[in-house]
Structure formats: C-alpha cells, structure tokens
Image (cartoon, grey):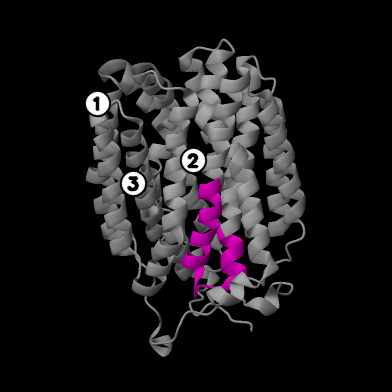
Amino acid sequence: MAACDILTTSSNGEETLRYEGWAVAAGAGVGVFFASLAVATFAVFLKPLSDEFAWSREAVSRAFGGMTLGAALSAPFVGRLVDRIGTTKVCALCLLACGGTFASLSLLTAHLWHLYATFAVVGLAMTGTSAVVYARVIASWFDRRRGAALAVVMASAAVASTSHPPMASALISFVGWRTAYLLLGLAGVAVGVPIVIWTVRERVEAPTHQGAPPGGATVREALGSRVFWILILVVFGSTLALNGVVVHLSALLTDRGQTSGRAAIVLSALASASLAGRLVTGWLLDRFSATRVAFALLAVAALGTFVLTDATTFAAGVVAAVFIGFGTGGEFDVVPYLLSRHFGLRSLSTLYGLQWTAWGIAGFVGPVLMGRAFDATGSYEIVLVGFAIGSLAVATLMLSVPEPVAAGCAGGLADQGGSL
C-alpha cells in the first residue's frame, strides 16, 4: 500500500509567514512550552525536596520516572483519542490538568507516595499537550516544510528547558520551593490554555476530500514494519541517557565543586543547544537524508555523554551539555518526521503515542539507574559510560532505516523497506 497525505499544500503557501499553518505551529509551541514545566525544572527542585524531607536522590528521582511512566501509559490512548475526535479539546483539557497538578506540589507532604502520585498525574496529562498530539496537527498543515514546522513546535520545549530552570531557581531563592511550584503551574493555566484553545486545530479538508480518511498505514500495518520497531529502539536508547542526565546534572556538577548557580547555567546551556539542534534539524530534514541526520545527531550526543563522565570543571560541563543537548534535541524532530513520512496521517498520533511509551519507560529507567549508581558508589561515571555506548549503538542502528518517501507523500508499507 502506498498513500499520499490528502492535504498537500503548495510550497508557495508554506514558505510565507502569512500561511495560517505557522500561527497554528506557534500556538502548539506554546502548549509544549508550558507542558514542559515539570520535566524542565525537576533537576532544580531535586535537592530542595531531598533536603526538606530527608529523601535520597534515588527516591526523589523515582518521581521523575513515575511521571514518564504515566506519559508512557497514556500516550497510546491519547493518540488514539486524537486520531478519532481531533485535537483542540484534548490539548486544552490536558494542559489545564498538567498546570493545575504541578501547582498542587506547593501542598506537598512528607510522604513519598504523595510526590509519586502527583508526578504520575502530571505524566498522564502532559501527553495530551505534547508532540504526540501536535505532530498530527503540523502534518495536516505542512508537507514540503514539515521538518521546519515540527522544529518550531519541538524547539519550544528547548526554550522551556532554557528559561524554566533559572526562573525556578530564582523563585526558590526568593519565595521558596512551594510558592515556586504554585506560580509556575498557574502560569501554564492562565496563559497556555487560552492560547491553545484559540490557535490549535487541524486543517479543514478540501471539499473534494470531505469524508475521506487520512492517507497512510493502519496501526496493525505499522506494527508489522521493521521501521517502526527500529524507531522504538532508537527512542528508548537515546532517552535513557538524556533523562538520566537531565535529572541528575545539577546534582552531579555541584558534587564536583560547582555552585548551584553555575549548575543552572549548564542546564540552560543544554537546553539552548537543544533549541539550536531542533531548529537546525528541522532545516536539515527538509533538504537531506533523515536517517543520516539522525545518525550524526545521536553520535554527537554519545560524545557529550562520554565528556560528562569526567567533567570536573565548569567549561567541561558546558561542552558536555551542549553536545548532549544538540544531539538529542535534534533527534526529537526526526522521530515524528519519519513516522509521518513512512506511515502517513491515518494513525500518526497513535503510532507516536506508542513511541512515547518507549520514551516513558526509558525516562523512568535512566534517572533511577543514575540515582542508584550514585547511592551505591558515590559516582555517576560507570553508568554514564554505559549510556554513551548505548547512544552510539542506536545511532548506528538508525542507518538501517530506509529513506522515507518523497515530500508530498506519506506512504504505507511499500515505502518502508519491507515488513517484519
């Protein structure tokens, strides 16, 4: 089966900022920006929570894992829901739940189950205002500039990771961690939800196509393709390192003699590099081989993880963070791009939701492995070496993915280099 996306816009329309799809992409970016609060600030709150309640780092990091597991559980169901009923209501309601639950951490008690339950709910909700949903929206508006449009949405998560940590750190210093949770969560509700309601929607089909289903593979067909399972392995392997580093980077650097302020700067450097990686990758995907772009990005991330194993200075920490951020940030653009090109729009949100399941499981395992390694040995070095090797392995695996169909089509299994 080979199928082209029903909605193929002219390149002239997509290449001008007056094209309505760019406003939709910007609104989706706002949704991702506020949905990223819990992920982006977790490392900043890790030590204050550990000190306040005398919890171990492994115990606190399990909350991050619970959040990603919540996302992993909900992603396929949210994706299926969006494929059936559309996007706007799902996005707005999930962003409301995400921001409100994050704000409720201001009332956190000295019970670990309370911490875990709250972050699990955040994880369940944030899938509905993530790229799982917005990738379908973007694919409905863009064809020739799909990579660039996805980069706009994905880059907003990097902007969040750049701005949220120093903001959270400053709020903790001035008003305490409880009020910081409250203010950040309420900002997502008050600002993010209205913008998503006003701007995010899928493109209305042309009259000649009304009533026709979106082109592409069914879920069953995609699950029979080796491309889908290779992408699952790539997402899992790269996420182990990324989430492990993101959760523990601030603690790792302060353990090695850096101030908390400098550690926050390194986190921002990682996020800034992620932003650059996503924007550059969007441009590259519209012009070059997606699989080779992905290989290069993951190789850069693996190199950064190797550097971090022995990063004892501020400069070395920045270099490692930049490599990790640029490589993994760009990789976030590649996965939805390849899914939309290989499998079309028909089940895109469901398929991307299943990819998020792999992300969520790895997001749980990575930080816990980092925390356990530190609690057992007082060092992160051994586990970081393992993460670096794993990242390089999945980078090589990415080269076995066949090239997607040409711009203008989002094919089925015939375009995917065979099925399992």
Q: Pointer 2: residues within 10 angstroms few (<14), some, or many (20+)?
A: many
Distance, label 1 to label 2, CA atoms, is: 24 Å
Residue wearing tag 2 = 158
In the rendered image, which residue does mark 3 sit on? 121
How dense is the environment of label 3, judged by Cα within 10 Å: few (below 14), some, or many (20 and up)?
A: some
Q: Amino acid at mark 2?
A: Ala
Q: Alpha-carbon neighbours of circle 1 within 10 Å: few (<14), some, or many (≥20)?
A: some
The secondary structure type at the circle numbered 3 is helix
Mark number displayed over residue 179: 1
> Amino acid type of disc 3?
Val
Amino acid on which disc 1 is placed: Thr
Instruction: Give the residue drawn at x 50%, y 80%.
Output: 6
**Secondary structure found at label 1:** helix
- The stretch of residues the image draws in magenta is 336-361
Closer to the eye: label 1 or 3: 3
Q: CA distance from mark 2 to mark 3?
A: 23 Å
| Residue 308 in view (yes/no) | yes
Q: Position of residue 356 (x, y in %)?
A: 51, 54
Please state the horizontal and vertical placement of residue 231, each as a whole percent of the image.
64, 58
Separation (CA) of disc 1 from disc 3 = 20 Å
Q: Is residue 288 visible?
A: no
Q: Is residue 142 left or right of residue 338?
A: left
- Asked whether 330 or 56 is in front, the reply is 56
Residue 183 percent across, percent down from the top left? 25, 32
